[in-house]
Image (cartoon, rainbow, N blue to C red):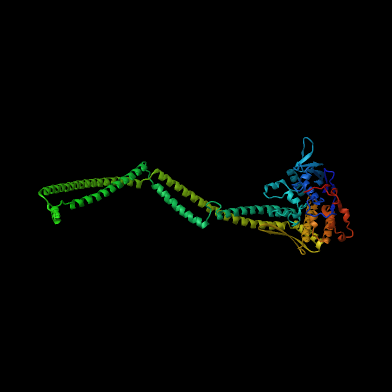
Amino acid sequence: MIHGVSSNKRSFHPVGFSTGLNVVLAERTDTSTQQDTRNGLGKSTLMDIIDFCLGSDGKRLRIDPLEDWAFTLEITLMENRVKVTRSIADHNKIFIDGPTEGWIEQPDEDEETGDHVFHLKRWRVFLGWALFGLASSYDVYKYKPSFRSLISYYLRTGMDAYIDPFKQCRNQKTWDTQLHIAYLLGLNWELASKWQDLKDQVEALNALDKAVKTGAIEDALGTVGELEAERVRLEAQIERELASLNNFRVHPQYKDIQEQANQLTSNIHELVNQNVTDRRRLTRYEISVSEEQPPSDTEIESLYEETGLVFSDSVRRTLADAKEFHRKIVENRKSFLETEISRLKDQIQQRDQRIEALTEQRAELMTILNTHGALEEMTALQERHVETKQELERVISRISNIKDIASRKRKISRNKSELATVAEQDHEQRREIWSSAVRIFDDNIQYLYSSPGRLVIDISDTGYKYNIEVERSGSEGIGKMKVFSFDLMLLQFLKAQNNKIDFLVHDSILFDGVDSRQRALALQRAAEIAQEYGIQYICALNSDMVPSEDFHEDFDFNRYVKLRLTDREPSGSLLGIQFER
């Protein structure tokens, strides 16, 4: 039970609450709009303050104008009425004033001041136990109920919290919704946790599968069939490489022999080239010898006689000498050519013999090279063999991974079906519990609209699915009243289950766009149920939202108003001050 809210600042308007309906009423007199940058009257701020004292992050309060503010929430927890104080400046500490007997978590004692203090994390753990019975044994689960998610269905803050009955914020994750609604409705929340574990496994497998198929993983492309074909090819290649290694003989002087063979080849080529050149020269010399003939004695005289010239005896003797000289030259040239021919033949023959010897020597070396190998070659062959085996191992690993992914997907699919079967059986066994929540919700909707309202709980392979069906559903107002009926049902339901939480807090956002008659019925229903169950309903309203003409004659709205705020002057707001946001 929340008894009141106060602050360390005198300008703050403290407010007290009691069992039943509690209304914070805001009266607007000027023309300010929601787009104004000034702080408002404080209805939503009051909700934020209560939430802040109950362990929220308080982001909307942690602003410079409120830096030196502290807020106190007076509340009964586990039959102990205490004052809970939390400051904006030191928001990780929660000061407790009052008895704490029987609490599973005890505050620490400040050595200097003697104050009893909870640090934020332990404060949330304690509130989870005190208001919802959360146990520390839940820590074995990756996904487990948390106090902050549960309390957000009983104290909705922000506009997004009033859109969907099953969500207390717009971006609430599916598992969070499934698990916490299951906890509140008495379903098996552990099954919701297991569903999310399976979803995580599927997501991880899908990411891996996508990486394999798109090639994000190195050398990961290929179907199982393609990889199996590659595996066969690599296995055959390994066999060939292994055979080559087994037959490989290393010659210690392989490199030297290889260099000798190369040098012999070079020498042979050089000798062959020299023979080619000499044979061409030999051919020319042999042709010259066969064609070389000295001129006849009368050739020159006949030539001159034809021209009409007559030589004297002295001239004739000179010509005779010239002819003799020429004959000698021809004989000498022929003798020289014959000598050269003989020499060339000898050289060619010697080279041929040298070529033959070198060729035989090279053949011996090539035989060694053909039957042996160098150590470097064997090392290279071994390295290639190792690389081939590694590639085979990668292919085998990829085949195994792909098959494993497929196998795990099938297993997860079976586990989902089995989990759904278990959930259906569990759902049936808990019928008496959850059907009570369904009946309460229908009663609340019938009170507002005189039409059935169905709280639907379905089970599929992906987990719990929740829905609300109202015959007159469609408008924003009906959507907001679904939230009201659902939240009020949760309070009624948990109170009937002997749970400790006994308050529900709604901002004026809940009543925006709601028909006047339904606003009146909702407030009357809240007052009626709160009185019947001994619980507390706190809400904020703008004065122009009060459906005075639609209340029952015996319903005195003003008796439920605990605080009136006004914008006539800054002091009329909750904080009593005005500042720019």
Count of picture labels: 0
Outermost residue toward the top in this view:
112
The answer to whether 35 is drawn above or below residue 62 in the figure is below
Which is more toward the observer, 541 or 3? 541
Q: Is residue 22 visible?
A: no
The answer to whether 545 is drawn above or below residue 355 in the figure is below
The answer to whether 82 is drawn above or below residue 521 in the figure is above
Which is more toward the observer, 322 or 277? 322
Q: Position of residue 260 (x, y in %)?
A: 33, 43
Q: Residue at x 84, y 57 (%)?
A: 544
Q: Is residue 431 visible?
A: yes
Which is more toward the observer, 178 or 429? 178
Q: Position of residue 265 (x, y in %)?
A: 32, 46
Q: Quadrant of residue 511?
A: bottom right
Q: Is residue 346 left or right of residue 574?
A: left
Q: Is residue 543 left or right of residue 417?
A: right
Q: Position of residue 13 (x, y in %)?
A: 85, 47
Q: Position of residue 446 (x, y in %)?
A: 80, 62
The answer to whether 436 is drawn above or below residue 112 in the figure is below
